[in-house]
């Protein structure tokens, strides 16, 4: 089996939305833990800056919401890491900003939120599923982590596009986990809690950062949950 | 509608619902079924081995520096599968035009010399030398490993041929299990696989394993170059796959290779007798003279007689059986090429190496459960 399952050393991880907020915190934490890390983000300058600040990480420029980018991203993830053990679908869109009532939300705005938060991660996960299945057959711990939100469960007014997309992602994660378990791949939706991130500031500019979780703490909790998931091995056959 | 020639599938659908499967059993008997029912042709204890190489966008358009002439470079080979081994490729060069012109009719590139710079979108390459043919070169890409992969990912297009006119996207050529991007053309026998089939195999106690093999270019449009195909192809066989094959053999199951690439890799990895895990460079040709050591049956696309893929099938069955299969493919309107129909050909009984091996087959009943120890025969040991 992969390592002792209590270390990230040599683990091949890809993180989307890896240049800010929780994604950047995850990339930093994984890099510090000796994992092999590739990260994806849209802005080439920020990707280059992040990759330069964390030597050994691989920055990939791409937009998970764009179908034409999906396989290009997957190709670069696979070549950067020589395979893949863990995909963290973290890139996220709030939908319309400032937040709108659903009745005021344009259908294009809803579609854009779904593209980033649901369809994009679905497509990228599909594109790397072959690599994850190969990792599982090799006895490694293949995992997809979809970063969720309590907005997936609680119907907050003005969070319609975001909440609906996150709810759909959470359900998709459960179904996919059920379907992929026999192939040794687990799909886990995790809610990191309210964090002091650019996305949160965009949604609620007046929130007091002191009341919010630090992304570094949320990242550490997510990696603890990931490590805990190794102790519930899938039926690799 | 028997026109005397098999027709090519011209639409890029990996699993058309009407896809057909012709089955040649070890006794030469031919049957037909729906391809989606492949699992029903197999038995508990069998092991399906597929090539999980994803396909590179290996067609790079650009210009030839010295002449300014438009060219298409088709990456065709690499020495290893290592992700950081991305600077040196062998490649086939065409002149102006694209896949919609038959390769046989494509314009030749300008004369290519060592030192010529090729600008291929964001990528810059230098011709290192020609490889015994004016259109077959070794080139060197400039830049960091990540930058080269990003350039290939963004600028490259899947290699394709005139029988499919619509431009292919990567999702058209990546199989459902595509992983490490290593193939120059899709290992298209794997298009038969989807996750429903993997589930069915699992349910029926049929094993599934993978290897990675850099499937090369299938055609250049030049008879002299085509005669040199397949080029050497690097591959990797994981230890878990070797273990699964050994277990299947021990327990009386058949090793079913999905595609010629899997056959080439496994037989190369076993060329010294015992199947070895790890990296290799397949440089052999498989044909009538080949004694198969590992593979018991092959799933392949339907291919025209005379093609190199077709020649490989002679390692499995004698020419008269293959001729009967060819007639059956024609009579039933099977479609050829990467998006076409499929065949499953089991190695004929006469090719079994020893009496011990034959006894192994005779002892396997169709309802044989998966993990039960067989009588302990170890053929090929």
Image (spheres, grey):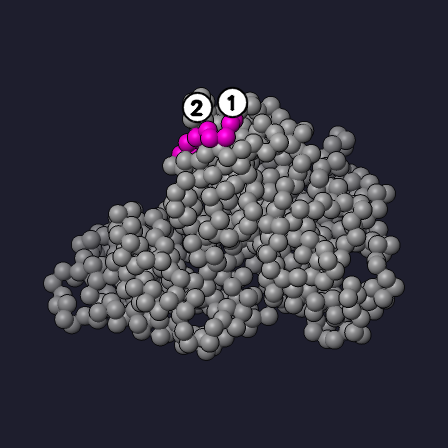
Q: Give me the residue at 12% from left, 68% from top.
A: A208
Residue ID at (41%, 48%): B145
* Residue B141 seen in render: yes
Is A203 situated left or right of A93 in this image? left
Up the image or down, B172 lies above or below A16; here it is: above
Going from N to C along the chain, the mark reached first, 1 or 2, is 2
Residue that label 1 marks: B110
B166 and A168: which is toward the camera: B166
| Dots 1 and 2 on the same chain | yes
Prevalent SS, magenta region = loop
Rounded to the nearest angstrom, the CA distance separating label 1 from label 2 is 9 Å
Query: How far across and how far down the image is residue A55, in percent?
Result: 32, 58
Residue designated by label 2: B66
Q: Nearer the viewer, residue A125 or B274?
A: B274
Q: Secondary structure at mark 1?
A: loop
- Position of the N terminus of chain B by quadrant: top right
The location of residue B230, given as percent across then percent down, is 65, 41
Q: Answer whether residue B116 is magenta in the image.
A: yes
């Amino acid at each position: 089996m992969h390592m002792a399952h209590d270390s990230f050393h040599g683990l091949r991880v890809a993180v989307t939305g890896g240049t800010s907020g929780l994604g950047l915190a995850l990339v930093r934490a994984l890099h510090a833990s000796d994992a092999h890390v590739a990260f994806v983000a849209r802005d080439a300058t920020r990707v280059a800056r992040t990759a330069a600040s964390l030597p050994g990480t691989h920055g990939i420029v791409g937009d998970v919401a764009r179908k034409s980018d999906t396989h290009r991203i997957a190709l670069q993830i696979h070549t950067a890491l020589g395979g893949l053990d863990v995909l963290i679908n973290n890139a996220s869109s709030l939908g319309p900003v400032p937040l709108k009532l659903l009745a005021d939300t344009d259908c294009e705005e809803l579609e854009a939120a779904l593209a980033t938060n649901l369809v994009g991660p679905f497509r990228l996960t599909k594109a790397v599923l072959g690599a994850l299945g190969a990792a599982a057959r090799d006895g490694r711990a293949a995992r997809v982590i979809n970063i969720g939100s309590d907005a997936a469960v609680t119907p907050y007014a003005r969070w319609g596009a975001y909440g609906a997309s996150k709810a759909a992602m959470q359900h998709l994660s459960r179904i996919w986990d059920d379907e992929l378990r026999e192939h040794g791949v687990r799909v886990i939706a995790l809610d990191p809690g309210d964090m002091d991130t650019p996305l949160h500031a965009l949604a609620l500019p007046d929130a007091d950062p002191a009341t919010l979780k630090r992304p570094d703490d949320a990242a550490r909790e997510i990696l603890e949950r990931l490590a805990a998931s190794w102790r519930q091995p899938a039926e690799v056959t | 509608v028997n026109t005397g020639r098999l027709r090519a599938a011209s639409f890029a659908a990996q699993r058309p619902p009407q896809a057909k499967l012709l089955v040649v059993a070890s006794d030469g008997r031919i049957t037909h079924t729906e391809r989606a029912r492949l699992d029903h042709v197999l038995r508990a204890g069998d092991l399906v081995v597929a090539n999980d190489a994803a396909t590179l966008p290996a067609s790079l358009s650009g210009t030839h520096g010295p002449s300014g002439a438009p060219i298409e470079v088709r990456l065709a080979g690499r020495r290893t599968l290592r992700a950081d081994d991305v600077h040196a490729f062998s490649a086939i060069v065409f002149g102006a035009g694209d896949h919609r012109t038959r390769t046989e009719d494509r314009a030749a590139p300008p004369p290519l010399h060592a030192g010529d710079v090729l600008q291929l979108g964001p990528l810059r390459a230098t011709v290192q030398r020609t490889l015994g043919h004016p259109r077959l070169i070794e080139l060197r890409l400039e830049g960091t490993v990540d930058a080269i992969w990003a350039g290939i990912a963004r600028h490259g297009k899947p290699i394709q041929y005139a029988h499919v006119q619509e431009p292919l996207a990567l999702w058209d050529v990546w199989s459902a299990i595509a992983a490490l991007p290593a193939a120059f053309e899709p290992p298209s026998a794997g298009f038969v696989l989807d996750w429903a089939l993997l589930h069915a195999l699992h349910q029926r106690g049929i094993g599934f394993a993978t290897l990675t093999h850099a499937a090369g270019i299938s055609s250049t449009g030049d008879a002299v170059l085509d005669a040199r195909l397949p080029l050497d192809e690097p591959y990797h066989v994981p230890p878990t796959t070797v273990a699964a094959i050994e277990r299947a053999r021990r327990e009386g199951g058949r090793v079913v290779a999905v595609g010629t690439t899997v056959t080439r890799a496994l037989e190369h990895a076993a060329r010294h007798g015992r199947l070895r895990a790890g990296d290799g460079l397949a440089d052999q040709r498989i044909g009538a003279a080949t004694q198969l050591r590992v593979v018991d049956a092959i799933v392949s696309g339907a291919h025209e007689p005379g093609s190199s893929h077709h020649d490989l099938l002679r390692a499995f069955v004698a020419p008269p059986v293959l001729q009967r299969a060819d007639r059956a493919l024609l009579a039933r309107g099977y479609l050829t090429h990467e998006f076409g129909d499929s065949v499953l050909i089991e190695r004929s009984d006469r090719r079994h190496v020893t009496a011990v091996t034959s006894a192994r087959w005779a002892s396997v009943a169709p309802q044989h459960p998966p993990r039960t120890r067989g009588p302990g025969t170890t053929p090929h040991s």
